[in-house]
Image (cartoon, rainbow, N blue to C red):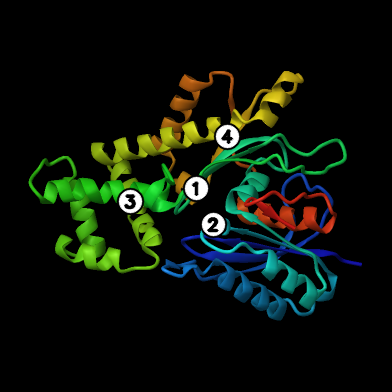
Amino acid sequence: MSRFVIGIDIGGSGSRAALAADEEEPSTGRRVVDTFTGPRIEVGSGGSTVLEVARGLVDSAASTWADQLPEVVGIGIGATGIASLSEGPAGVLAEFSAEFGIPAVAAIDAVTAHLGALDGRGGAITVLGTGAIAIGHPGSDDHGHWCPDWSRVDGWGHLFGDRGGGAWLGRLGLELALRTHDGVDEYGSVLLEAAIRRFGLPASWPGRFYTRSDRAGLLAEFATDVAEAARSGDAASAELLDGAGREAARSALAAARAAPLRRAETAGSAPVRIALTGGLAAAGGHLVEGFGAESARLHPDATIVDPAGGPLDGALTLAHLGAGGKLSAQDRVVWT
């Protein structure tokens, strides 16, 4: 009989769900049968809409894949802001499990990004999406169980952190643009032109941004303009991307310095593996170069690996681990 898992990835720029065959420890990702997309989360005075978005996506998945639902053995949900901007998903997960008779597990988006990027092996990653977060883990034990050893760095949101992420990059780009607009310097002239094309005249920006519940996603939209300007030779944009890559390297290596990873190194395992992943990482060029240069400066022995997959792949792996009882809960990181 066929077995399936459902993976859900929820972020500040949108969400996705996938149905995949539940193959035991696939080497190159699970065979995806179908996918669909959903809304991005919003953050306001009442907190994040992440749990509402999760509820809607699971209901849509149950309806869309009704024929396969009896063979679904696990649901895995990875989401941004699920630990810091909501009451936590324990109650919603219990509802899912009771309603559908399927084990449901959830994790912060960095965990699913880790499981996808490092193909279920130990190491540390930085995820650059709308926000930014780094996480490290030594990997599964000899029985394939993932202990609660996740070590998190950043993920503090666009006001306090998310260093190197899309909202961080977009905000700094707009700051440079406004310096040029104010006549302070001309360094951000290319960025000012790009920002006006996207958002209109600067006088409208405070009203456009400060009143929005999804302002982080709006800021992150401008990161694409920063990346495009850098590819066209704009020095200011290239410098911003280089800085984002360096911030990402610092965060990944901070996560890699966690005690479980140090113990793994001491035991004689392979050197620390780190990776850069997330939608913004696709900007490549100066961002990736900054990541590599700062990693080499801070930890010459670290090995940078290319991501094997993305957070949706990781959400499917999360569902598989939860269905097999191979995942332990960790406060504000993983819920089972």
Q: CA distance from mark 1 to mark 3?
A: 16 Å
Q: Earlier in the sequence, mark 2 or mark 4?
A: 2
Residue 332 percent coordinates (x, y): 62, 52
Residue 206 percent coordinates (x, y): 22, 63
The kind of residue on which mark 1 rests is Gly
Residue 153 percent coordinates (x, y): 53, 40
Q: Residue at x 70, y 39 (%)?
A: 149
Q: SS for tag 1?
A: loop
Q: Are marks 3 and 4 in contact (CB under 8 Å)?
A: no
Q: Is residue 163 above or below residue 310?
A: above
Q: CA distance from mark 1 to mark 2?
A: 9 Å
In the rendered image, which residue does mark 1 sit on?
155
Q: Earlier in the sequence, mark 3 or mark 2?
A: 2
Q: CA distance from mark 3 to mark 4?
A: 25 Å
Say whether residue 68 is visible: no
The kind of residue on which mark 3 rests is Gly
Residue 80: assigned label: 2
Q: Are marks 1 and 2 in contact (CB under 8 Å)?
A: yes
Q: Residue at x 70, y 81 (%)?
A: 63
Q: In the rendered image, which quarter is residue 273 located in?
A: top right
The kind of residue on which mark 2 rests is Thr
Q: SS for tag 4?
A: helix
For the residue carrying disc 4, how many other residues have a C-alpha within 10 Å: few (<14), some (14-19), or many (20+)?
A: many
The kind of residue on which mark 4 rests is Ala
In the rendered image, which residue does mark 4 sit on?
255
Q: Is residue 274 above or below residue 322?
A: above
Residue 59: assigned label: none
**Left or right of 142: which side holds 76?**
left
Q: Earlier in the sequence, mark 1 or mark 2?
A: 2
In the rendered image, which residue does mark 3 sit on?
170
Say whether residue 31 is visible: yes
**Left or right of 151: which side holds 195?**
left
